[in-house]
């Protein structure tokens, strides 16, 4: 087939990708083409605007390396990371809610004994004692749960964003009763990296780059679904405008002073059993964009190669 027009092109591209042998690839490519073409039909970009879009993505890619992941940042700031999280994690019973991983997790953080400080001596910031438990849905302690913790410094930067080596991150193991405790610094609000294309997108849309103060956690245990979450600081002024849409009420905690004047924070995490994934097949499209086939609802997909 040749001589496509604005009217016939989408259907032709959809037909071409319908030949993908893998069913999931077929489904993903069908949706990608359908929505991308619909976007272009709606926006009707000039050639210059389309090229600006290509340059934006090119600059985003060029900024990515093992220390900076501008594509994750773009996904986070456009709410896509949280959408994927809602689809895949959700909440079951009293299970602790999840939120974004963010780009500053580092695998292989140093393992520390319970009670240790993740802040190297001399680290700026208000010392803070964190404690809590890791339990299952029915309240049973999860002995030996592996807890990774990381946070930014008082200057708002993570260790991987500056020279000086590992700081403010560690791995702990819950004790036989599922309990944990460690020291850190009280988290502060900070801007996501905004000196690149994502920063320009935020500025162009009148948005600030700030995240409310938080401690990052991942918690893993055999037979449980891995939890990726934060504990946000109650009262932080950015709780309602987090640049990455990650705040959930259930994850906001008080960082209270104890009698010795030290900030403290307590949280009991609840893991859910593995295998309760919530991902559902996408709902059938309500209407097809102009120029596309009348939608695949009620019609059999062409078999590969058709
Ligand atoms: C973070 O909290 O570390 C983070 C999350 C998303 C984007 C940038 C940073
Ligand atoms: Fe963070």
Image (tube, rainbow, N blue to C red):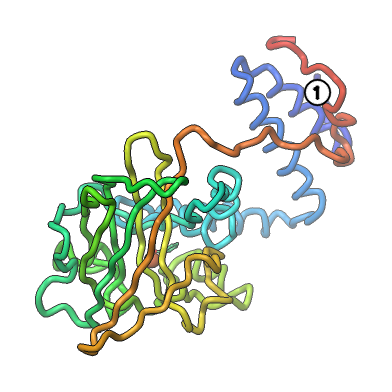
Specify whether 187 is left or right of 30: left
Q: Is mark 1 within 8 Å of ligand 1?
A: no
The foreground one among 75 and 268 is 268
Asked whether 25 or 154 is in front, the reply is 154
Local crowd at mark 1 within 10 Å, few (<14), some, or many (≥20)? few
Q: How many marks?
A: 1
Residue beneath label 1, please?
Answer: 2
Q: Vertical placement of 202 versus 306: above or below? A: below
> In front here: 111 or 137?
137
Give SS at disc 1.
Answer: loop
The quarter holding residue 155 reads: bottom left
**Above or below — where is 159 with respect to 27?**
below
The spot of residue 80 in percent (x, y) is 58, 53
Going by the picture, which residue comes out furthest to the left? Answer: 121
Q: At 49% across and 70% down in the image, what residue appears?
A: 199
Residue 59 % position (x, y): 46, 57
The percent coordinates of residue 128 (x first, y second) are 25, 77
Write the residue at 53% across / 72% down: 242
Across and down, in percent, residue 203 comes to 56, 76
63, 116: nearer the viewer: 116
Give the quadrant of residue 281.
top right
Q: Does residue 59 appear in the picture of this structure? A: no
Quadrant position of ligand 2: bottom left
Q: Looking at the figure, which quarter contains the C terminus?
A: top right
Residue at the image position 40 percent from the left and 77 percent from the top: 190
Q: Is residue 103 left or right of residue 112?
A: right
- The N terminus appears in which quarter of the rendering? top right
From what the image shows, is residue 300 above or below residue 292? above
In the rendered image, is residue 195 in sight? Answer: yes
């Amino acid at each position: 087939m040749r001589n496509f027009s604005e009217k016939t092109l989408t259907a032709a591209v959809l037909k071409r990708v319908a030949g993908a042998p893998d069913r999931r690839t077929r489904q993903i490519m069908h949706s990608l083409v359908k929505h991308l073409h619909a976007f272009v039909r709606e926006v009707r970009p000039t050639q210059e605007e389309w090229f600006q879009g290509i340059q934006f993505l090119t600059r985003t890619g060029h900024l990515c390396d093992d220390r900076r992941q501008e594509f994750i940042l773009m996904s986070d700031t456009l709410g896509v990371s949280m959408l994927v999280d809602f689809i895949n994690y959700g909440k079951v019973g009293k299970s602790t809610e999840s939120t974004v991983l963010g780009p500053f997790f580092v695998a292989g953080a140093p393992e520390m004994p319970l009670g240790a400080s993740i802040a190297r001596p001399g680290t700026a910031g208000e010392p803070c004692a964190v404690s809590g438990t890791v339990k299952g849905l029915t309240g049973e302690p999860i002995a030996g749960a592996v807890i990774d913790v990381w946070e930014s410094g008082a200057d708002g930067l993570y260790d991987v964003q500056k020279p000086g080596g590992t700081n403010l991150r560690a791995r702990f193991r819950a004790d036989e009763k599922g309990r944990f405790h460690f020291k850190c610094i009280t988290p502060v609000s900070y801007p996501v990296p905004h000196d690149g294309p994502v920063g320009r997108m935020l500025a162009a849309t009148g948005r600030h780059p700030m995240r409310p103060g938080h401690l990052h956690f991942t918690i893993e245990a055999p037979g449980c679904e891995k939890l990726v979450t934060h504990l946000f600081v109650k009262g932080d002024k950015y709780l309602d405008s987090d640049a990455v849409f990650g705040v959930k009420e259930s994850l906001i905690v008080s960082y209270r002073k104890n009698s010795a004047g030290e900030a403290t924070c307590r949280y009991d995490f609840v893991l859910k059993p593995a295998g309760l994934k919530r991902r559902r097949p996408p709902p059938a499209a309500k209407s097809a964009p102009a120029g596309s086939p009348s939608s695949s609802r009620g019609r059999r997909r062409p078999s590969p190669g058709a």
